[in-house]
Amino acid sequence: MTYQDEELGTVTVTVSPRARSIIMRPEVGGLRVTAFRGASLAFVKGAIDKFRPSLMKKQQMLKERPQVTAEDVERMRQAAKALLPRRVAELAYMHGFHYEGLSIRDSKTRWGSCSGRNTISLSLYLMQVPEHLQDYVILHELCHTVYHDHSVRFWALMDEVTGGQSCVLRAELRKYHTA
């Protein structure tokens, strides 16, 4: 369902059987909402109203950020495919990690992920961050091949492989956005 909001623009509401809450993603021209089954439109609008100030702030930040073109994405994809597999292999070898496979994706919500089968997926948008932060994301996913959670043991391993800098690097990475 789609409707117009005076301040936010076009609001697109999608119902997902997997959703357990309402997820609101600001976009340049509107808002994308994923709702759980059974959520009424009135409930969704109430949730939007509750978070309206922060949604509008995020939307304004998106409008101010330079837009990535299809050509930019393709350039980043080629660069990522040329650089990231080699770097993942190097860091895995240096630190004794083993992973099953690697894919480069157009992921806009995550820098990377690691499946239960130890397949690593990296966002091509990593090409927009400095090399030391690319290494941080790669090491983060490689650590997930050992601990598939964010437990104390996981963060201890992250500190070990980043020379005690995992918190500093994590904070620095938060200044960047995937798209």
Image (cartoon, helix red, strand yellow):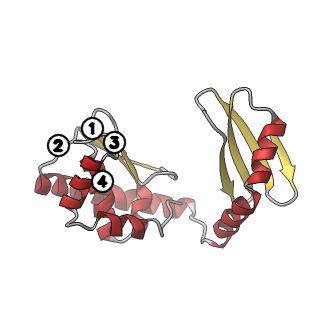
Q: Nearer the viewer, mark 3 or mark 2?
A: 3
Q: Who comes first in sequence, dot 4 or dot 2?
A: 2
Disc 1 crowd, CA 10 A, few/some/many (<14, 14-19, 20+): some
- Label 3: which secondary element: loop
Q: CA distance from mark 4 to mark 2?
A: 13 Å
Q: CA distance from mark 3 to mark 4?
A: 11 Å
Disc 2 crowd, CA 10 A, few/some/many (<14, 14-19, 20+): some
Residue annotated with mark 3: 149
Question: Three-letter amino acid code at disc 1?
Answer: Asn
Could you tell me residue 162's position as x and y percent? 22, 64
Residue 178 located left or right of residue 65: left
Q: Nearer the viewer, mark 4 or mark 1?
A: 4
- Label 4: which secondary element: helix
Q: CA distance from mark 4 to mark 1?
A: 12 Å
Could you tell me residue 128's position as x and y percent? 43, 67
Residue annotated with mark 4: 140
Q: Residue at x 30, y 61 (%)?
A: 136
Marks 3/4 in contact by CB < 8 Å: the verdict is no
Q: Residue at x 79, y 38 (%)?
A: 43
Could you tell me residue 134's position as x and y percent? 33, 63
Marks 1/2 in contact by CB < 8 Å: the verdict is yes
Question: Three-letter amino acid code at disc 4?
Answer: His
Q: Residue at x 28, y 60 (%)?
A: 83
**Observer-nearest of 54 and 11:** 54
Residue annotated with mark 2: 98
Question: Three-letter amino acid code at disc 3?
Answer: Asp
Disc 3 crowd, CA 10 A, few/some/many (<14, 14-19, 20+): few
Marks 1/3 in contact by CB < 8 Å: the verdict is no
Residue annotated with mark 1: 118
Indicate whether 131 appears above or below 29. Answer: below
